């Protein structure tokens, strides 16, 4: 069952502060309380449920990761829209100190947003019991649970590998990450030149914060299939989150070649330019994102942010005013008197 989007229930962006959440909750309670308005009992329950989760930082982090995880599995482009709706960049990844030399693989790191990472780790904690529901099979370890003979009858290695990949993806959705990893490993043994194996196993490593393993798998995916759907997009976002903005720009540019009408790609490349202090390039990319999707208030807000850094005060006010009119909420609006003047009654 899909995760309920508590932000949408309250009508808030995922960047909402606790003060904004509380204020909105009080407003909705007054509007939909059953004592005041009959017929809204179910909606009122949803509002209460959403508030109970979002007002608790631990529960909210858990929810954010769940939402990002499930959205990514179903639609990577929609995940991009969820992530970019959060203005604040995630905490920068600092690789752990290790004694051994790094792998000779080209080093591009795999990271996520703080919400995604924090929440997935909580979800993974529930996957310590490795049980696979396959007929009457009751083996006690993941390795024993994945019996080659269970699927092999009449199948080629390629067909069996595809079965293992699908099974592993299902286990990922069930949060049984250890057993999913076993299936991916067996699929890689059977079909070592199948980019699907490495892409999805890379996502699994990514969710488990095993960045070097995720990096190796994504690099292998793109070596096997340079035009692999979402391969460059995913790697670009990882580089961006790790402050490798130049590397991110290179991968976003490559992704745009294969998907030139994806507004998310231009927007995210624009953010990478922004953090390199190339504000003119950032504005050009966000211009293109808005041209492709003018209904996204986040784009106007971030373009205004870039214009502010470029010294274009009038352009900042214009873009922020547009974002505010479209329902975007941020304390930053309080910095601009032009927005107060525009919203005040004549």
Image: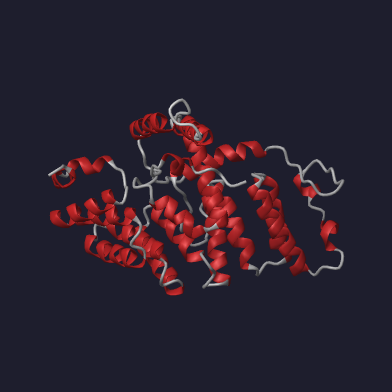
Q: Where residue 246 sits: x, y (%)?
A: 35, 62
Q: Where residue 137 sits: x, y (%)?
A: 85, 46
In the picture shown, does residue 232 fall above or below 211? Answer: below
Quadrant of the rendered image containing residue 269: bottom left
- Residue drawn at x 70%, y 67% is 191
In the picture shown, does residue 222 fall above or below 275? Answer: below
Quadrant of the rendered image containing residue 127: top right
Extreme residue toward the front, this view: 38
The residue lying toward the viewer, choosing from 99 and 33, is 33
- 161 lies left or right of 304: right
Q: Where residue 341 sits: x, y (%)?
A: 13, 44
Work out whether residue 8 can be spotted.
Answer: yes
- State the scheme by which the image is colored: secondary structure
Work out whether residue 247 can be spotted.
Answer: no
- Residue drawn at x 23%, y 55% is 319
Extreme residue toward the top, this view: 35
Counting every numbered tag in the picture gives 0
- Residue drawn at x 46%, y 63% is 233
- 124 lies left or right of 131: left
The residue lying toward the viewer, choosing from 12 and 60, is 12
The residue lying toward the viewer, choosing from 107 and 46, is 46
Q: Quadrant of the C terminus?
A: top left
């Amino acid at each position: 069952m899909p995760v309920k989007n508590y932000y949408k229930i309250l009508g808030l962006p995922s960047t909402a502060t606790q003060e904004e959440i509380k204020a909105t909750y009080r407003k909705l309670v007054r509007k939909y309380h059953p004592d005041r308005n009959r017929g809204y009992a179910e909606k009122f329950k949803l509002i209460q449920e959403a508030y109970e989760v979002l007002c608790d930082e631990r529960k909210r982090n858990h929810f954010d990761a769940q939402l990002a995880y499930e959205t990514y599995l179903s639609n990577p482009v929609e995940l991009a829209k969820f992530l970019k709706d959060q203005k604040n960049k995630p905490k920068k990844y600092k690789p752990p100190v290790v004694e051994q030399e790094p792998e000779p693989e080209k080093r591009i790191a795999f990271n996520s947003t703080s919400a995604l990472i924090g929440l997935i780790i909580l979800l993974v904690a529930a996957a310590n019991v490795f049980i696979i529901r396959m007929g009457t099979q009751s083996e006690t370890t993941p390795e024993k649970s994945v019996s080659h003979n269970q699927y092999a009858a009449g199948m080629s290695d390629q067909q069996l590998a595809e079965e293992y990949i699908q099974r592993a993806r299902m286990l990922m959705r069930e949060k049984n990450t250890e057993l999913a990893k076993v299936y991916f490993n067996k699929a890689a043994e059977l079909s070592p030149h199948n980019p699907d194996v490495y892409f999805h196993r890379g996502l699994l490593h990514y969710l488990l914060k095993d960045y070097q393993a995720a990096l190796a798998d994504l690099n292998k995916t793109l070596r096997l299939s340079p035009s692999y759907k979402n391969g460059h997009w995913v790697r670009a976002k990882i580089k961006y989150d790790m402050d490798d903005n130049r590397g991110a720009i290179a991968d976003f540019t490559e992704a745009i070649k294969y998907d030139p009408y994806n507004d998310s790609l231009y927007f995210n490349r624009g953010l990478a330019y922004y953090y390199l202090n190339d504000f003119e390039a950032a504005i050009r990319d966000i211009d293109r994102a808005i041209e492709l999707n003018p209904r996204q208030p986040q784009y106007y807000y971030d373009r205004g942010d870039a214009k502010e850094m470029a010294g274009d005060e009038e352009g900042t006010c214009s873009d922020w005013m547009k974002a505010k009119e479209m329902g975007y909420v941020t304390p930053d609006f309080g910095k601009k008197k032009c927005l107060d003047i525009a919203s005040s009654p004549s």
